[in-house]
Amino acid sequence: MSDLALAPGDAVHLLYRAHHGWLHNWLRAKLGNSFDAADLAQDTFLRLLRHRHELDALREPRAYLTTIAKRLVLNLHRRRSLEQAYLEALALAPEAVAPSPEQRLLILEALQEIDEMLAGLALPARQAFLMAQLEGLSHGEIAVRLNVSLRSVHRYIAKGYEQCIMAVM
């Protein structure tokens, strides 16, 4: 695609014109609705704008756009799953302690940030870290629950802290 040798902003514009409709249709087929597809198509091109300096090496634009869009679809599903779990937990709480709508939004945003921070961890490390932080379990209790050594639990929790620190830096 020799047109991408233009200025980076021009390359994004050309990609948008040539592939936005196709990407929207692809996402609509994946997601089953046009609204989420439109949002994620726009988010895909926003990500592309952030990395427009890499476009001169782009040989397969649809493959590149699909890769970005797939990650965004996964993030959407994770976010909705997390939101559903929170709402289910909230439904079990007494109404007197229910947070206001503003507090719910802040809590959901915080949960999403935590989920993103821990997304890079392997599942056992994420589970161990959350058991320690949210359930207050000892390292020994976590080792028994996960059927791993105490040393592994120490390593998992240290990785969880490291992941959180790296995310805020």
Image (cartoon, helix red, strand yellow):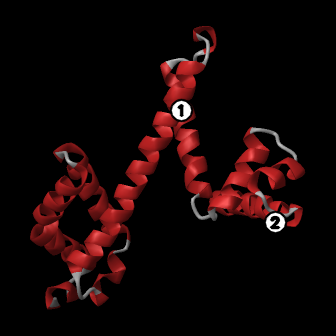
Q: Are marks 1 and 2 in contact (CB under 8 Å)?
A: no
Residue in front for this viewpoint, 121 or 146? 146
What residue is drawn where x is 37% and y is 73%?
51
Residue underneath mark 1: 86
Question: Is 92 in front, or is 164?
Answer: 92
Query: Residue 153: image x %, image y %?
Result: 82, 60
Task: Tell me the SS state at disc 1.
Answer: helix
Dot label at residue 152: 2
Residue drawn at point x = 57 percent, y = 50 percent: 115
Q: Residues within 10 Å of mark 1 (few under 14, many from 20)?
A: some
Q: Name the side, left or right, on which 87 lies relative to 158.
A: left
Q: Nearer the viewer, residue 62 or 128?
A: 128
Quadrant for the C terminus, please.
bottom right
Instruction: Measuring from the top left, give residue 159's x and y in whole percent.
Output: 74, 64
Q: Which sits in the foreground, 103 or 69? A: 69
Image coords of residue 97 (percent x, y): 63, 13
Residue sitting at x 29%, y 76%: 64
